[in-house]
Structure formats: structure tokens, C-alpha cells
Image (cartoon, grey):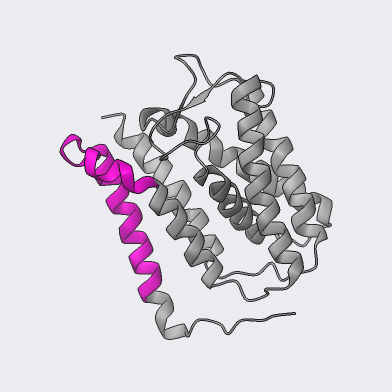
Amino acid sequence: MIVSAPIPARHHAAIRTVLVLAYVAGIIGLHLPGLANFFRPLSPLMLIGSLVVLLLYHTDWRPSFTFYAVSAVFVGYFIEVLGVHTGLIFGNYAYGAGLGPRVLAVPPVIGINWLTLSYCCGSVCNLLPTPAWVKVAAAATLMVVLDFFIEPVAVQLDFWTWFGQPVPLQNYVGWWLVSAVLFSMWYALPFKKENRMAKWLLGLQFFFFIGHGLLNLF
């Protein structure tokens, strides 16, 4: 087992402040027409940066965690490839330019997003004093709740499109099922699930998409 040294406590407040400011800037920058063209290309970098911060706070680098991380990226990416080309997983949708270059019609950064979100939800729900199967269900449900707030903002930011149709129920069912598979791996594999930055990043994800959605009402 490889255990990395924890980040010194004196740096936590500064890192959290930078993250909060970055997400606030993203909300404002993407909402204001004069700044949106500058901030839109930064969206993939923000996803990557969030994962980097999360992994800096990860302390248990045994092979089982590496296996999960690689699996989550590949499963997340290729399930989206299958979904885009068949419509069988999430419904009829397509990716836009908002998340950067696309390979097989899907931005590779979407795999990173699946890892980041599943890590955060899995870490937070690991605190529940319940059996593993309940944690799996809770974490998958948390992922779907987050996606509920992501969807309208993602369409507005050209992350993806539903071709003018309402988001289908199939999308949320698909998200729950794919998430449940990932969380079954997450809780079954032997590595430490604690990460003091996970709850912050998850909270910032909710803050970003809810905040952006509220601004779109005005």
C-alpha cells in the first residue's frame, strides 16, 4: 500500500478559498455575455483542475484505487460513446463544443468528470452508518440529484444538447444504473474512501449549477 503524506493543514484554507473563487468566477463569467467567450474554453480545464485537487488529497494509493480510477474514466467515457451513438443508455443527445475536443463524438474530459463526481459522492456517502448496498444506492441517487441541476445549465452552455426536447426520464435512470455499477466497485475495493476535499468539491458542483440556473431566471 502506498500512502501519500497529507497536505499540511495550513494550506487547506487557501486551497478552499481558491476553489470557491474559481467556481464563483465561473458562474459570473459564463453568465455575462461580455466574458462568456473567454470563460467557455476554460470549462474542461476546470474539470481537470478539480480532479487534480481531489487527487492531491487522496492518501491511499494502493493498486485497487488506481484500478477504480482508471475504470471510472473508461466506463464513464465509453458509456457516453455508446449512449451518443445508440440512444440506448441516456436517450437521444449529442455533445456540443463546450467541453472541448470530441473523440468518437464525446469529449474525453467527460470520463474525468465521471471519476470526479463518483469519487466525491462515494466519499461523502461513505460516512453513512449503513451497509455497503445502502451506500451504493445513496451515492447513485446523489449523482442523479446533481445531474438534475446539471442538465439545464449544460444545455445552455453547449456542453450537450437534447435537440430541443425535454430531458428524458431515461437519462436519469441511466445515470443511476451506471453510477450504481461504479459505486459497487468503489465500496467493494479495499482503499480508504476518506478525502477532506470531496465534500467541498461536491458542494461547489451543486453551488455552480444551481447558481447558474438561478441566474438564468433573470
Give the residue at the far left of this rendering.
Answer: 34
User: Which percent across, then down, holds residue 68?
Assistant: 71, 58
Above or below, 153 against 195 in this view is above
Give the residue at the far front of this rendering.
Answer: 103
Total numbered circles: 0
User: Which percent across, then down, holds residue 146?
Assistant: 54, 41
- Closer-to-camera residue (83/136): 83
Q: Residue at x 55, y 32 (%)?
A: 104
> Does residue 80 show up magenta in the picture?
no
Q: Is residue 6 left or right of residue 76?
A: left
- Closer-to-camera residue (105/120): 105
Above or below, 160 against 41 in this view is above
Q: Residue at x 60, y 52 (%)?
A: 115
Q: Is residue 56 left or right of residue 20?
A: right
Above or below, 94 against 190 in this view is above
Q: Quadrant of the N terminus?
A: bottom right
Q: Is most of the magenta stretch helix, strand or loop?
A: helix
Q: Residue at x 80, y 68 (%)?
A: 190
Q: Which residues are magenta?
A: 14-43
Q: Quadrant of the C terminus?
A: top left
Q: Is residue 33 left or right of residue 61?
A: left
User: Which percent across, then down, holds residue 63?
Assistant: 75, 69
- Is residue 149 among what the camera can see? yes
